[in-house]
Image: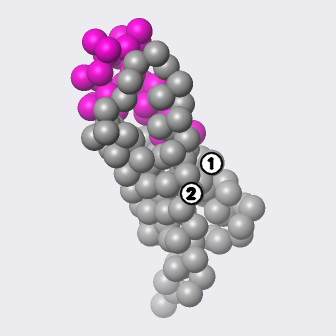
Amino acid sequence: MKQAYRVFATTILGLIFGLVCYALAAAGPQTIQGPIIWQMVLSRTVLGFALGISVFTFYGWFLRGIIVGALFSLPLAFSSMMGAAMSDMSSKQLFLGTIIMGMIYGFLIELITSVILRLKIETCKE
């Protein structure tokens, strides 16, 4: 049952960080189209869900958040490179920035869930 709370908490945190991601992107001079907004929010929500259902320890919550954050930010990072023509940043900067922000969001989701809420991963013991 505790695992269900963990999945719920990480998914909600992913949604919140997806909205934060959108707010940060919308603060720039360019306008963001609807499908891009959905992709940002859903990408971070899926990141939170993946952290919730993940049973891999990666030597603790710290590395799990960073590694899963980087992996689940790859699709958003590749698609953000297409928006370089509308931005004052190069495609490399957008790609790396998206990956780094995903690592930060993954770290923060794990920090809040594992340390503050104390919803640690339950492993199956035989």
Q: Residue at x 51, y 54 (%)?
A: 14
Question: What secondary structure predominates along the stretch shown in magenta?
Answer: helix
Above or below residue 27? Residue 101 is below
Above or below residue 69? Residue 13 is below
Magenta extent: 77-104
In the image, is 73 to the left or to the right of 59?
Answer: left
Residue 10 sits inside the magenta stretch: no
Query: Which of the two marks, 1 or 2, is nearer to us in this view?
Result: 2
Residue 108, image x and y in percent? 62, 48
Task: Please state which amino acid type lies under the numbered disc 2.
Answer: Leu
Task: Please state which amino acid type lies under the numbered disc 1.
Answer: Leu
In the image, is 90 to the left or to the right of 29?
Answer: left
Viewer can see residue 122: no
How many numbered markers are drawn? 2
Assign a secondary structure to mark 2. helix
Q: Which residue is mark 2?
A: 13
Residue 87, image x and y in percent? 37, 14
| Residue toward you, 54 or 45 | 45
**Label 1 Cα neighbours within 10 Å, binned few <14 / some 14-19 / many ≥20:** some
Residue 72, image x and y in percent? 37, 47
Cα–Cα span, label 1 and label 2: 9 Å
| Residue toward you, 40 or 98 | 40
Q: Earlier in the sequence, mark 1 or mark 2?
A: 2
Q: Which residue is mark 1?
A: 108
Residue 88 sits inside the magenta stretch: yes
Above or below residue 8? Residue 86 is above
Residue 95, image x and y in percent? 37, 25
**Label 2 Cα neighbours within 10 Å, binned few <14 / some 14-19 / many ≥20:** many
Q: Are marks 1 and 2 in contact (CB under 8 Å)?
A: yes
Assign a secondary structure to mark 1. helix
